[in-house]
Amino acid sequence: MLSQQKHPRTELTISFEFFPPNTDEGAEKLAATARELALLKPKYFSVTYGAGGSTQARTLKAVLDLRAAGHAAAPHISCIGSTRASLRETLQQYKDSGIRHVVALRGDLPSGTASAGEFHYANELVAFIRAEFGSHFHIEIAAYPEYHPQARSALDDLKNFKRKADAGADSAITQYFYNADCYYHFIEQCEKMGVTIPIVPGIMPIGRFSQLARFSDACGAEIPRWIRKKLEGYGDDTDAIRAFGLDVVTRLCEDLLKAGAPGLHFYTMNQSALTTEIWKRLGL
């Protein structure tokens, strides 16, 4: 059991992540997806943020559109390449719009950009938000059970996570994974270091293998060999990939919830079908 993660089922934090659309058609599709997933009564929808704030305007619009439709929304906000003034302005916009939940990240510099700006690490962003806005925002941070791909060592990554938590974070969302043991081990290590905030596992439904492999190679999330070989073996058989993926991810979610995970955060890719089917299979 995960001692500090155990919560009654009524307190499960279920959330869904979107990326900001860049066309009117994409915005209409996202609105329809949000309506469908809202039937599952998530705690909130989060909206991602491009490298160096490159999608800032689209992220803001997507978040405000979700709010206007009656959904709780949490924008991602990254500090790399930003100034204190620009971050203060962005956060004030969110506060003025009634947003009380943010996902604070270091982020990445856009290609070809030389300056990291006034911030270098996510713990600095968390501390800045707390200093400027007090307790107004619920602050989520990122966690990496398989460790950040740029971390010098596992211990360094754990220390970085503790710094973010200690700076004033309320809870965390993990990078997606398919090996539950990495999550259990990560939680145990965090507990030993005195980190007590809820750490919600990130869940990536499997729809297309080529897309999943590309994402996983980029973010350092391991696809276990047996899963990769099965998916490769299905070739272009989309139905077989989806059926196998639904079985694998549903079983993963079942194991995590039984072990005491405080919730699930689904990376939806702006699609509702796979997430909804997993939800139904879990009996949530």
Image: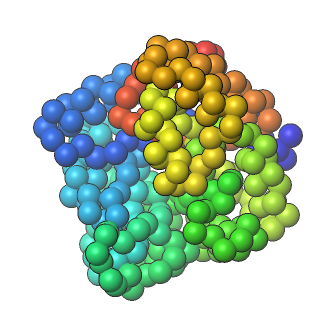
* Whether residue 168 can be seen here: no
Q: Residue at x 63, y 30 (%)?
A: 229
Q: Nearer the viewer, residue 173 or 90?
A: 173
Residue 247 or residue 208, whichever sits in front:
208
* Rendered-image quadrant of the C terminus: top right
Residue at the location (73% across, 35% down)? Answer: 256
Q: Residue at x 38, y 81 (%)?
A: 116
Total numbered labels: 0
> Residue 113: in sight, yes or no?
yes
Residue 179: x percent and y percent? 71, 40
Q: Is residue 56 toward the left or the right of residue 120 in the image?
A: left
Of residues 208 and 10, the one drawn nearer to the viewer in this rendering: 208
Q: Where is residue 52 drawn, in percent x and y?
A: 33, 69
Report the residue at 52% width, 15% height from top.
240
For this view, does 60 lie left or right of residue 258?
A: left
Question: Horizontal and vertical percent for residue 68?
Answer: 24, 39
The chosen color scheme is rainbow
Look at the picture and state if 89 lies above or below 281.
below
- The image quadrant that residue 246 belongs to is top right
In the picture as drawn, the residue positioned furthest to the left comes out as 24
